[in-house]
Amino acid sequence: MKSSLRPLNSFKKMRSGSGSIQAAFKTMTLVHRSCCVKMGCRRTDCLAAPLSRLFEKLGAVVGSRPVYFFVIPILLSAALSGGFVFLKDREDNDLERQFTPRKGPSKATRAFVREHFPHDPSMFSQDRLYDKGNFASLIAVSRDKSNVLASPAFEDITSLNDRILNLTVAGVGQGFRQLCARANGDCVPNIILDIVSSNGTDSARVSYPVHTLGSGRVFLGSVLGGVVTDANSSVTSARAVKLFYYLRDPEGPDDVSRLWLREFTELFTETCCEHIDVSYYTSRSRQEEIDSHTTDGFPLFLITYACAISLSVLSCLRRDNVRNKLWVAVFGVLSSGLAVVSSFGLLLYIGVPFVITVANSPFLILGISLNNMFIMISDWQHTSVKDPVPRRMAHTYKEAIMSITITALTDVLKFFIGVMSDFPSVQSFCLYTSTSIIFCYIYTITFFGAFLALNGRREASNRHWLTCIKIPTPDPDQYFGMYHICCVGGDYDENTGAENKNLAGNFFKDYHSPFLTKPWVKAAVILLYVGYLATSIYGCVQVQQGIELYDLAADNSHVTRFNRKHREYFSDFGPSVMVIVSEGFPYWDRTRRTQLQGCVDDLKGLRFVDGDVYTSWLDSYLSYGRENHLNLDDRDVFLSNLSPFFALFPVLKQDVNMSGGAVRASRFFIQTVDIANGSMELHMLNGLQAAAQACGAAPLQVYHHEFVFFDQYSVVVSSTVKNVGVITAVMLVVSLLLIPDPVCSLWVTYSISSVTAGVTGFMVLWDVSLDSISMIIFTVCIGFTVDFSAHVTYAFVSSSKSGPNDKAADALSTVGYPILQGASSTILGVSVLATSEFHIFRTFFKIFFLVMFIGMLHSLIFIPVFLTSFTCSSNKKENKDNTLKISKL
């Protein structure tokens, strides 16, 4: 307390006497530093100090007995690799089970529909299916962009249709006519072909989107695309025609209908038509496509692995033939491979499902392993070359493993929390990744550390990096020319006793740090950061949600081609949506009926609903009552005449559930329009559900079988926010426990939020939507940003230098180049994914690149500036020096 009063007394004297303003300012600065020493910069190394000592002892043990720590991980990996025998059995890429929320509301609605409106196989209706059904489909587009309903394009379509109808399953003798879905005893036809054929070449006699056929009306919006109509809504031309071939429901895995679908797809292996371009699709195409490409990520991983080894070796090359770290880099990358093999093998043994999203995990583990490797190499190079290997390993583990532990602990906790996700695919991914990180951490300490010690023994004996033959130390007077280049080594810095730093390491110490700590540079960096943050926030408000399910297929897949044609020509009309009255309702009560009709009108009045295309058993029944002079406002009359009405209109009988002489549930159908992308699907789903919930007349539900996939939209944002929040909270707790400065711990935590905003904003600007796939990748990569900021901050706090600028220079000198090595090697390594034909891998590359690049900017530029500008030193030596200066003043 006395030391803090002295400067105050001095300040009073200067104020009353001849003291200058400058002296007063200096005094106030010292007062602030004094208070900072006494109050603000408390160390929180209650765990860091004992753990550092523990790692120091472990390093000495590994350095003394490296062979054991080197061989055991290899044997363990060999044993666990046997789990890959079960890979095919563990594959589970069921789209609905893996990529939709486990407790999605549409699944509950589907269960209600299945129970109350069971499918009638004798009266097939596409709109009334509670699932996608069993079908084949094709889209025919005229090659010369002419009217597809006119000759010769239409002739090709009818000819192709005849070929499909005559397809038979080899060895069984059953064709479409034996396997088709039926209504009124006949196969469900492609009515558009009958309509156009009956009108000859005069397509102007076809009305769009609703055509009157006999006494009924037919909706053509789902089968005609790129339509041009005249003032009377008659078709003048159409660019595309879609045909459906619905089959009966399969009775088992060996059902003949599955074999017929295979015959259907083989029909299009060659160009089938001269005047039309045909895209095809079946009810099994999407699932078969993703099943066939589950392990396609492994070849990409091998290429990435080879690139990572090459880049790591290049960055670890030294001109000194003894200090060369080439083999250290090779075995550092090999360590990540062993971690992936061990973790995947273990979980495959246990029986954990292997989902296609898990194929992204090895790329993440490779990045983590490279980062750990470069950090350990850097700390090894800071040890004295004259010390025995166990002592050098002890020092390396004390400095490096503590930092690696912080990042590994936060990553593991984050991914284990992700196991509680609503998406099973996320659960599998997080379980595989968290287990891989544990093995990566263990193998870094054991396998890689042991090889580092073995390499240290070679260096201690002054042996050549390639031949392991002892070579002389550098002597300019004795050795020169090629012999000096190839056969001499073992040089070191005689001032520090450590290895000579390479040019990149000296760059951070001699150029980058002094430049970054200049006052005007700090101001420029802060302005740059403000601009970065503003751009990120702008991108965040533009974020788009939605997933194109064909994104799970390859670019050149028939699934992708079909869906793109569908989006191009048939997006004017969306799905036909069920509006379900889920409880008993007095339909004969005119007042209540009017209220219910008002709710339906509200749904029909939505912007994305066509109010003129509407199917209602109740409206048809009321018209029937008027024609037959029935008083349907009477309960008994209403219920007793339903049976004769349904006898005349049997398809409408499927829309009413009657039990015990009462209507327990019923449904209507509305037609959506202008559903061109995933964002519109989200808007449609939210709008329909909000309008249904707002109905006070009766409990309403809305359903279409695609809504099961749309449910992810209501979960993906909240899940992403929750995951980022969990990551931030975990990082804060771990940082406070392991980083000896609470203010610096807060900066590490803040960097996560900052990088999250940047990645989200620039992700949107790079045309990446937020969906269940990008959510997985986004959450994974955001956790990776912890590594960079934690390494820099821990090095800053642990530095023995006195001032903040010196601490920053020391930290960047120690970890700056390893961070640059890890980030650049990983980015260049995963760049092979940018050329992938799969959306999943390209999305991974985009987000991973943004995370690595923005995280590197934070760790090498933003965080050092913030640490030197907005934190106070907690070093004891500096505290003592400041107190001494204040006392003298």
Image (cartoon, rainbow, N blue to C red):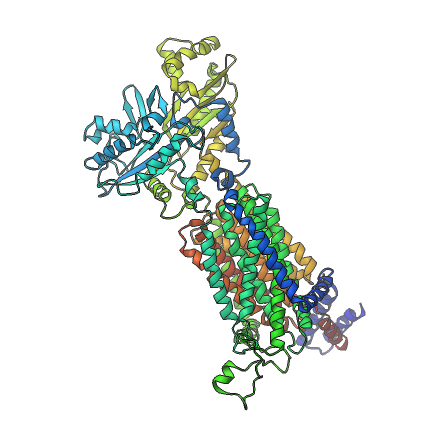
Please report the residue visible at 43 percent of the width from the left and 49 percent of the height from the top.
Answer: 839
Query: Which quarter of the rendered picture does the C terminus lie within?
Result: bottom right
Q: Position of residue 286 (x, y in %)?
A: 41, 40
- Please tell me which residue is depicted at 34% across the width and 19% down the height of the picture: 185
Q: Quick one: which residue is furthest to the right in this view?
A: 2
- Residue 753 can be seen in this image: no
Q: Nearer the viewer, residue 697 or 93?
A: 93
Left or right of 485? Residue 17 is: right
Q: Quadrant of residue 671?
A: top left
Figure label count: 0
Left/right of residue 866 with respect to residue 217 in the rendered view: right
Res 576 visible: yes
Residue 37 sits above or below residue 689 on the image: below
Looking at the image, the residue that sits furthest to the bottom is 477
Residue 867's x, y, as percent? Answer: 62, 65
Q: Quadrant of the N terminus?
A: bottom right
Query: Is 549 or 696 nearer to us in this picture?
Result: 549
**Residue at x 45%, y 27% (from the top left corner):** 579
Q: Is residue 541 left or right of residue 410?
A: left
As drawn, 344 above or below 9: above
Residue 666 x, y percent position in the rendering:
47, 21
Position of residue 616 relative to residue 426, above or below, is above
Where residue 374 sits, quadrant-wise, is bottom right
Decide which of 82, 833 is in the foreground and name it. Answer: 82
Q: Nearer the viewer, residue 45 or 531?
A: 45
Q: Residue furthest front?
A: 171
Residue 801 position within the rendered picture, expressed as x and y whole percent measured from the top left: 67, 73
